[in-house]
Image (tube, rainbow, N blue to C red):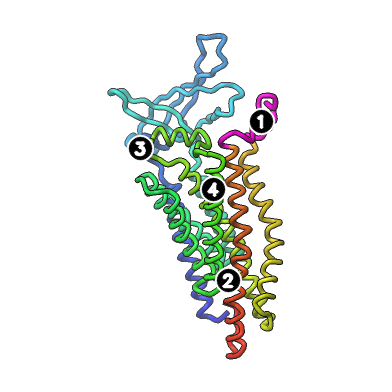
Amino acid sequence: MNEKTSKTSWLIIIVGLFFMFLLLFHVFGSTHDGIYATARVKSIQQIESEDADSNEKTFSVQLDFLSGPFAGRTMDAEHFETPGSAYNLDLKQGETILAVAEKQEDQLIVGVDEHFKSHRLMFLSMVIIIVIALIAGVNGVKAMLALFFTLIIIFGVMARLLLQGVSPVPLAIVCSLAIIAINIVIIAGRTRKAFIAGAGTLCGVVLAGLFGWLAASLLKLNGYSGDESTFLQILNSSIDLRGIMISGIIIGALGAVMDVAISISSSLLEISLANPSYNRKKLFESGMNIGKDIIGSMVNTLILAYTGASLTLILVFAMQKDDFPLIKIMNMEFISTEVVRSLAGLFGMVLAIPITALVASFVYTRKTRDQIETGTAKVE
């Protein structure tokens, strides 16, 4: 690595880290939003209950408000806890919490909401970003930047447009295209390798969405996948829940499909440069062989990710197996939705392999031959 390249790499790392820390501070650094504000527990004291049979404990809490319109003021609040409940906060004197302060009919209502976690989440995120930057260097910073841009597109653009009534499925495809372009250009640059990976990813994601749409029609899924779907329908009755579900399938499949496409594209580039005599058929076969190995690990990755996220629900079903036999579980709306989500991701990922290998076999054989003849063979 020459001096100019080294300086450019360090510049990318420094600017990238600065941007990510700034974004983290914007997301996690806010200490006041609406009726919520940070407060420190000045004192906490249990109040004797008048009901001897009640297990609920009542605490009188003094709060020093640190942010918001009541910053600098000390106010009293009541806090309730039930022994053995997972919702207990177990407040300690001196700790920072998220408090609620709201005026209702000329009366100020003050309460304890949650432990204040944002600053610790910001610290943990910064630690991970620094570790990735130290170990992976420029590539690690590029990957994290791509992730941040992905989150901006999903939360800042896609979510807002969905609430404005934009059709979910076309919007998901357009946002996926933007995410693919940004991620692959940042990670792989403007190269043929990036073009091949992008083409394979886009085809795989569209096929995953098509599978999800056909499955939803076949199984008569309506998009009610949980309490949040019902709540969303109450807040906005015009929301297309089935469209939202298919959009979620498309976005959910994006990461795994992109991972496979980039792996195939990079591997076949190295093979084509190491074996310039390979024709399109041999290069395609090599891509398929690599893809078969990738499928074995990625299938486990996808299924285990969904299973891990549903572990609590699995335990509930196991404890109440008489009320929830297998025939009941497999016909529940939200279970069927999650199964379709997993199958659609696998469908898109598996089909992305031959598509990426086919495109690469055409591009790399011609490109490698041209490089060998001109003596400019190099990794793109």
Please provide the residue range marked out in magenta.
313-334
**Left or right of 256, for residue 45:** left
Q: Is residue 236 visible?
A: no
Mark 4 vs 1, N-terminal side: 4
User: Closer to the observer: label 3 or label 2?
Assistant: 2
Q: Quadrant of the N terminus?
A: bottom right
Amino acid of disc 4: Leu
Amino acid of disc 2: Val
Q: Is residue 144 visible?
A: yes
Q: Residue furthest left?
A: 106
Pointer 1 residue: 317
Q: Are marks 2 and 1 in contact (CB under 8 Å)?
A: no
Pointer 4 residue: 214
User: Closer to the observer: label 4 or label 1?
Assistant: 4
Secondary structure under badge 1?
helix
**Left or right of 212, for residue 237:** left
Q: Position of residue 257 (x, y in %)?
A: 58, 58
3D distance between C-alphas at marks 3 and 2: 52 Å
Pointer 3 residue: 34
Amino acid of disc 1: Phe
Amino acid of disc 3: Gly
Secondary structure under badge 3?
loop
Callout 1 crowding tier (Cα within 10 Å): few <14, some 14–19, many ≥20: some
